[in-house]
Image (spheres, grey):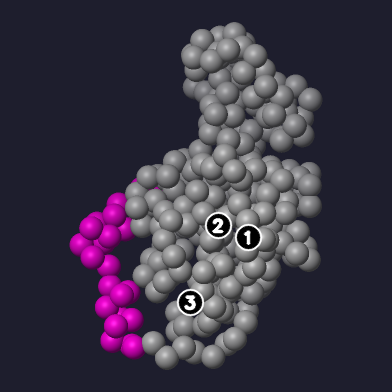
Amino acid sequence: MDTTITGIDQANDQWTLALNEEQRTLFMEVIEESLRLQNRAHLFNWLQRGFQCLLAHEVVIIAVRGMERASYDYEYLTSSRYFGDSQFDLVLHEQEGLVNQAFTQWAKLGTPLFYTTEHASQVHTHYAIEQVAAEPMLLSELKRFVVHGFGNEHSRIATMVMFGRLSSPANARSAHLLELLMPHLHCAIVKVTSNKSPAIMSTSKHGRVKPLSKREVEVLEWLQAGKTNWEIGNIMQVSPLTIKNHVQNILRKLDVENRSQAASKALKLGLINRKQ
């Protein structure tokens, strides 16, 4: 990446960074709502509401590292049918993964870093752009993405986040919004992942947690309540066969053998809450 600061007009840049009244209102609502997050389902829903109005995206990859672990643990949340487990493994490949490269580069720069096929690589005062070839971006199904983080090797807990399939192009306004949101996003991530023990986290392939879809989390909640596939199907208005497929996916992702183990592990991971 060319690390030369581009000659942008500073006055114009300051104007670009200023939030309008609607964005300021949304920003305060997003911060206030973040205080009520308790689990991953809450985090996913939070990112799908007001957060989307500030930084529209379809895929999120979250990386968390505590002082007891030298490496990061990864998981993803998505509302896109185009991004799944295969793309997740592809973009985090140790040598060739785009997101893995981006996280490494971010650790050196410390500012929001956009990966795109649309603009030449450049470094601005508060953000940077890395141009990538069309083919790897197409294979990743991320279209364009941005990474940012909170903390470093000396932090008790450090987090990095990738927002993919962004609606808006790389620019100073999006970077500034991400800089403002990142401390609150960091706190939210730490809060919903703090009850995961290292033993549970290490059972995932390459330290990556295979995430559950919103529907799978809903099925888990009913499993934990003791409902049968037929009962869950009636509640969710789908066939028992569809529920059976969801259950099989849940067992595979959580690396457990039966429904009881799945519900127990989901409680430990904070994916669901204990029924009263």
Q: Residues within 10 Å of mark 1 (few under 14, many from 20)?
A: some
Q: Where residue 267 appears, x then y in whole percent?
A: 61, 33
Q: Quadrant of the N terminus?
A: bottom right
* Mark 2 or 3, nearer chain start: 3
The type of residue carrying mark 3 is Tyr
The answer to whether the residues at label 1 and label 2 have Cβ atoms under 8 Å apart is yes
Please tell me whether residue 28 is drawn above or below residue 241 in the rendered image: below
In the rendered structure, which disc, 1 or 3, sits on the residue that comes first in sequence? 3
Real-space Cα distance between discs 1 and 3? 20 Å
Against 42, residue 262 (above or below) is above
Q: Nearer the viewer, mark 2 or mark 3?
A: 2
Q: Residue at x 42, y 91 (%)?
A: 7
Amino acid type shown at disc 2: Lys
Q: Which mark is residue 143?
A: 2
Q: Quadrant of residue 257?
A: top right
Q: Per the image, is 261 magenta?
A: no
Q: Is residue 22 magenta?
A: yes
- Rounded to the nearest whole Å, what is the CA distance between mark 1 and mark 2? 6 Å
Q: Amino acid at mark 1?
A: Met
What's the CA distance linking mark 2 and mark 3?
19 Å
The numbered mark, 1 or 2, whose residue comes first in the sequence reads 1
Q: Main secondary structure of the magenta part?
A: helix
SS category of the residue bearing label 2? loop
| Residue found farthest to the left | 21
Residue 93 percent location from the top left of the image: 75, 59
- Identify the residue position indicated by label 3 in the image: 127
Instruction: Tell me, for residue 137, which label it has, or none.
Output: 1
Q: Is residue 257 visible?
A: yes
Left of 89 or right of it: where is 107? left
Position of 105 with respect to 207 (left or right) is left
